[in-house]
Amino acid sequence: MQIVIHYAEIGLKGRNRPRFEAQLGSALNRLLRPLGGRSRKLWGRLLVELPDDAPMADVGERLARCFGVAYWSRVTSCEPSVEAIQAAVDAHVATRRFASFGVRARRIEKTLPFKSGELAGLLGARVQGLTGARVDLENPELWIEVHVLAQEALLLHERVAGPGGLPAGSAGHALSLISGGIDSPVASWELMKRGAELSFVHFHSAPFTGKASVAKARELVQFLARCQGPTRLLLVPFGELQQTLVRDAPADPRIVLYRRFMLRVAEALAGRIGALALVTGESLGQVSSQTLANLDTIGRAATLPVLRPLIGRDKEEIVRRAREIGSFAISIEAADDCCSFLMPRNPATWTRPEPIAQIEARLDVAGLVEATLARVEEERIEPEP
């Protein structure tokens, strides 16, 4: 069985295009190797060879999480001659029932002795003569699509949309703050779709709270790792630092202080692992810590870029996306996390950096960060099968 893989954005990468094609091929091999699949490069596309008995539902599920795939299709391969293509089309339409059809023909190899329009006309007349079906180029029941390359012609059976984006790891390494809620897995997915390779950091308040949030973070990272392979998860015990802030800092800006310390710790960890940016699931105005003023105050604690792919989305949009990608069911599992531990009664919604810096000047910021970093645990999360 053969499957053709088409990309979109990769085709615009100019001289860097071979690198992106190679990374897409590696991702396809990683995902489809358990099914016996292996990819090879063709002009402007990739071809995957699979055993004839490979389960198509499993193939489709795996390709749905292969970033960089614009669409894919099972194909019949034949010689790039009119006679061989006609024979392949005859066999293809003989197994299908349809009242209308359209033909798409693309001659990729320009030295062949026919043009795309000529081939489409020949195939259309032949199919109409064989079946009596009418031609409909707007919304046909069956598309007959042929791509003619130098050494072979590919008859596509049916286009299936892929996730799009860029191949895993093609955009560099970032560290994502994953809370266990709905937002941060979606934010991570969106960055992975843009080609970022992610490691993850989870802040928890154990032993002052239960370990359910840690278990849920592992489950979410394992789910997300299906898109990029084995993944690093850093677990940060945050409860002692939180208790220090409760004792030594005012209550109202406490959430902002928590977030600033999280960014400091995350940035130090990013330096250890070579990550070039931090990723959060923040959305403007969604909660008190995510007002524009508070986001500004929080963000100034880091020198690395803080990427917020959900910043302009409302909660309904984020929930809908979580359902689409499949993380929602995990995210709504009950678990206490550090965000709900030692919360102030009236969290500040409008802070500025200068007053917060004055509060932090009375704290041993470097010592608190170093003490927290000393207790970080690292795990390697293998993706779900």
Image (spheres, rainbow, N blue to C red):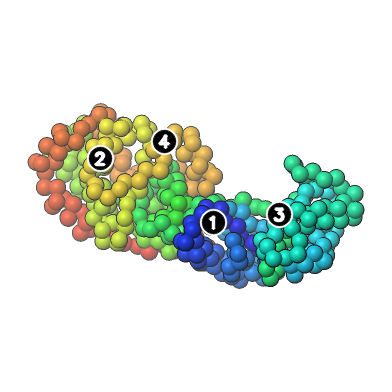
Q: Residue furthest left?
A: 362
In front: label 4 or label 1: 1
Q: Position of residue 136 (x, y in %)?
A: 79, 43
Q: Position of residue 208 (x, y in %)?
A: 26, 47
In front: label 4 or label 2: 4
Q: Residue at x 36, y 61 (%)?
A: 232
Question: What residue would you read off at disc 4?
Answer: 312
Between 354 and 382, the one lying in front of the other is 354
Q: Residue at x 60, y 64 (%)?
A: 43
Question: What residue would you read off at disc 1?
Answer: 11
Question: What residue would you read off at disc 2?
Answer: 298
Going by the image, does 187 lie left or right of 248? Answer: right
Q: Residue at x 30, y 61 (%)?
A: 274
Going by the image, does 249 lie left or right of 56? Answer: left
Question: What residue would you read off at disc 3?
Answer: 158
State the CA–CA distance, disc 1 to disc 3: 22 Å
Q: Residue at x 72, y 65 (%)?
A: 112
Q: Secondary structure at mark 2?
A: helix
Going by the image, does 280 lie left or right of 364? Answer: right
Q: Say which amino acid is labelled 4.
A: Gly
